Amino acid sequence: MENNSERVFSVKSQVDDVIRRANSNFHTAFYFLPPEKRRAVQVFYAFCREVDDAVDMNFPDNGNGPSKIINFWRNEIERVRKGEKTFTPLGEEIKEVIHIFGGNLLNYFELILDGVEMDVFKRRYHNFDELYEYCYRVASSVGFFCVELFGMRSKSAMRYAELTGVAVQLTNILRDIKEDFQRGRVYIPLEDMNAFGVSEKDFAETKGSEKLKKLLDFEAVKAKTLFEMGRASLKRDEVAKLYFCHLLSGTYESLLDKLRKGNFYLDGKKIKVSTFEKLVGAMKTIKWWWPEWVFR
């Protein structure tokens, strides 16, 4: 049975605190949303950060750390679903989002938890299909949430959300490759590592081997292709309705391009995409709206 002591899991759950502490690619896009939708996205983002950060701080799992946190949040989401009083400020915020935009959005909170749970128990991925499933859970879920928030559930819009979400998470993986390795996680599929003759020792090298760079570029091409496939799946009349999603995907695609140009910054240098680069990236995702000379 849960008790008030479990509130410690969400001492920092208040949405504004999470948003304020985070340095995120979401921030620029937030300001282009109307107030209610902005708050809904902020709440979902805060939930993702709260769960992910709590699990990371308690990794590896010892039976009382990440698993307990995930189960707590599963129960909190279930309380929201049943209309019961929640144990956290964030739970109350989620309840308000559901009241305004509908209970189906709770499915995506649960999908996030499924993905984070994979992070607890799965530290290596044998092939791209396994990695795709992880990316689908932790990132396509964000796309589904945003698409549905804008009142869209067409097959084309959901396909866009799925493919773009996976591309975004692959970009995150490529950006955090060294940091994840230090935490004992390797997301690059073992099948691909073997094909390029890369071992885990290559991840530990200060500047990264040439074969590692080639492997990472191979994965980056997958991400780039998924971004392009996602855009191609949208119908023309759906593009304007998903402007917020284009702002996000454009930001991450710009980050991906920068990673490739910088040899994935394996030397430990910090990579940063400026606000201008984010906006240009977003414009490029809908470039058929713009005169051709803009992007020459």
Image: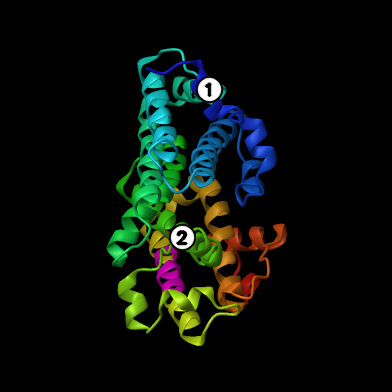
Task: Decide whether the magenta segment is chiefly helix, strand or loop.
Answer: helix
Question: Does residue 5 appear to the left or right of 19 in the view shown?
Answer: left
**Magenta stretch holds residue 221:** yes
Query: Which mark, by number, is residue 184?
Result: 2
Q: Tags 2 and 1 in contact by the CB under 8 Å rule?
A: no
Left or right of 275 on screen, residue 82:
left
Of residue 132 and residue 151, the one placed in the foreground of this image is 132
Residue farthest along the front direction in this orientation: 62
Residue bounds of the magenta highlight: 219-227
Q: Is residue 106 above or below residue 251?
A: above
Q: Which amino acid does label 1 sit on?
A: Arg
| Location of residue 42 with respect to 182 vertically, above or below | above
Comparing 175 with 43, the one in front is: 175
x 49%, y 25%: residue: 94
Quadrant of res 266: bottom right
Q: Distance between the residues labelled 2 and 1?
A: 29 Å
Q: Name the amino acid, label 2.
A: Gly
Q: Write the residue at 47% across / 51% down.
A: 239
Above or below, 14 against 215 in this view is above
Q: In which quarter of the image is the C terminus?
A: bottom right
Name the residue located 52 percent from the left edge and 84 percent from the top edge: 209
Does dot 1 land on a helix, a strand or a loop? Answer: helix
The percent coordinates of residue 276 (x first, y second) are 71, 60
Can see residue 288? Answer: no
Q: Mark 1 points at which residue?
A: 7
Q: Crowding near pointer 2: few (<14 within 10 Å), some, many (20+)?
A: few
